Image (cartoon, rainbow, N blue to C red):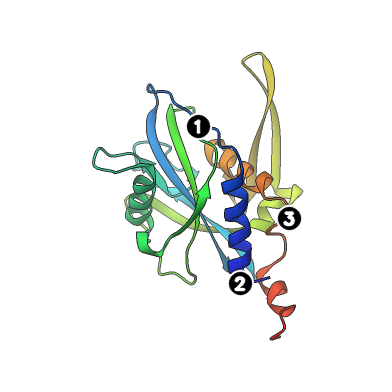
Amino acid sequence: MSDSTIEGMIGGVLSARKKVTVRDQSLMPAAVLLLMYPKDGKYCILLQKRTDGVEHHKGEISLPGGSKDPEDRDFLDTALREVHEEMGIRPEDVTVLGDLDDVVTRTQFGIRVFVGTIPYPYPFKPSPVEIAEVLEVPVVELMSPANRREEARWVDGRVSKAYSYAYKEHLIFGATAQIVTQFLELLPGTLELSHSERRSDSPES
């Protein structure tokens, strides 16, 4: 199965589902991009560790993205602009596959979540002001039960599960973990087969 087929499957799943949209004018509007690509035989998700110099979520692991500016045409424009500012990824190099449910953060951001791919290898140019470290996290690492933490919380009169993920010395939690969980649960098994395994099974190998 080729990369284009896998990405087509993901796009199909995203377009076929009913998306949950949050319409709360009191929230600060923002958008992020969950970018995936094959690296070293495995699909990876691009994450980043924020510096201590940013205004919000200092030192946390996040997806590329940020607040919506008045000049942004829409939320996708916000996500693409922020990804370029933070990671040096050009908007024309991003193939958008669809979007996930909106997410609300504890800091009262309402986030639109887009899913896309980029060609790889890619010459990332992380902003030294905003990005302390670039993390290319294999999907198989996130899917491993050994790296996934589950916590039950009482929210609005009911039990709610919150997930976090361990990757090397990092902990992925909060809205980022919520988005990653949503993505992984929406696509069970689709990305479990590594890029190298697919290539070895191809007729050309």
- Work out whether residue 16 or residue 168 is closer to the camera in this orientation and state it: 16
Identified by mark 3, the residue type is: Gly
Q: Residue at the spot x=38%, y=21% of the render? A: 26
What is the x, y in percent for residue 19? 56, 37
Q: Quadrant of the N terminus?
A: bottom right
The residue mark sitting in front, 1 or 3, is: 1
Q: In the rendered structure, which amino acid carries the disc numbered 2?
A: Asp
Of marks 2 and 3, the one in the foreground: 3
Position of 169 with respect to 204 (left or right) is left
Residue that badge 2 annotates: 40
Q: Secondary structure at mark 3?
A: loop
In depth, the one of 178 and 165 nearer the eye is 178
Mark with earlier residue (1, 3): 1
- Looking at the rendered image, the disc whose residue lies closer to the viewer, 2 or 1, is 1
Looking at the image, how many numbered discs can be counted on the residues?
3
Task: Name above or below for residue 14 compared with residue 124.
Answer: above
Residue 82 on image: x %, y %: 35, 49
Query: Which residue is disc 1 drawn over?
Result: 21
